Amino acid sequence: MTQHRHLAHAFGGHDPGVCAHAQCGNSWQLSGDSQQARQHLAQAVALAELLDHPNSLGHGLHNVGIGHQLGGDREATYAAAHRAAALAEKFNLPPWRASSVILVGWATAVGAGAADAVRLIDAEIANATAVGPLPQYYLGLAAEVLLAAGRAADALGHLDRAIAGIDEPGIGIYLPEIYRLRGACLLALDRNNRAEARSAFAIALDIAKRQGAVIFESRAQASLSELAYQAS
């Protein structure tokens, strides 16, 4: 264990094994295999706990929260992200605090918790995108919460900012969802935006296919099908 722990300092401050399990889990989740995803996500947390290294555990919990969010599991997302945020507060780990709070906001943005979730998003999105490792992803989550709360214009602003920050076209985590949500925002603002929304859904579908992101491909296809049905 002693030999393993020192790698955290050579690997961006967190353990590479924890990172590998978490990202493997996220990849399985995107490919549509939730069982394999859960196994690797659990292994990420177990290894981080064994190493007793706070930053590796914060990293693991945060990325496990992302993995569950990708699969749409609000309860599991909340459990991991809430723990990550508390750990970040205790050990002063800025990269994991605000970004984990955004995940908590997404996880609780239903029913009676929706208003509090919006307040969390509004309060922390600037911090999450400033210090978090995945600014486009957090902007996408924020947009989803705001869209559900009836703030389509604000959501669209976050999505356009996310797209503007992409360095290489078609490359980036959550990019298919960012375009799909953009189409949904356009329709929420004006049903006459069908052509532009259809284009956003088509881009989402194309990127998801090229990334092998099966769950995003399915969502983009559903949005296109629904739009076609409404126009018939």
Image (cartoon, grey):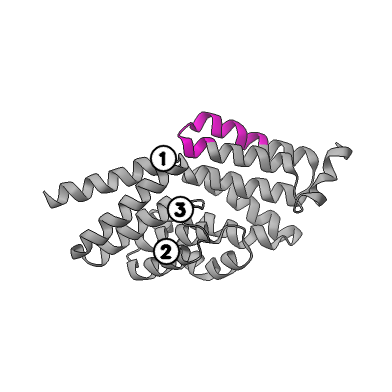
Residue under the point 70% across and 54% down: 87
State the residue position of label 3. 170
Which residue is farthest front? 168
What amino acid is at disc 1? Ile
State the residue position of label 1. 215
User: Would you say the residues marked 2 and 3 are in contact, meaning their CB atoms lie under 8 Å apart?
Assistant: no
State the residue position of label 2. 159
Residue under the point 19% across and 63% down: 191
Q: Is residue 84 visible?
A: yes
Horizontal and vertical percent position of residue 179: 38, 56
Q: Nearer the viewer, residue 5 or 98?
A: 5
Which residue is farthest right? 2
User: Badge 3: few (under 14), some or many (20 or more) residues near its Cα, within 10 Å?
Assistant: some
User: Badge 1: few (under 14), some or many (20 or more) residues near its Cα, within 10 Å?
Assistant: many
The stretch of residues the image draws in magenta is 28-43
Q: Is residue 72 visible?
A: no
Mark 2 / mark 3, whichever is N-terminal = 2
Q: Is residue 140 above or below residue 161?
A: above
Q: Nearer the viewer, mark 2 or mark 3?
A: 3
Q: Is residue 211 above or below residue 191?
A: above
Residue under the point 64% across and 60% down: 97
What amino acid is at disc 3? Gly
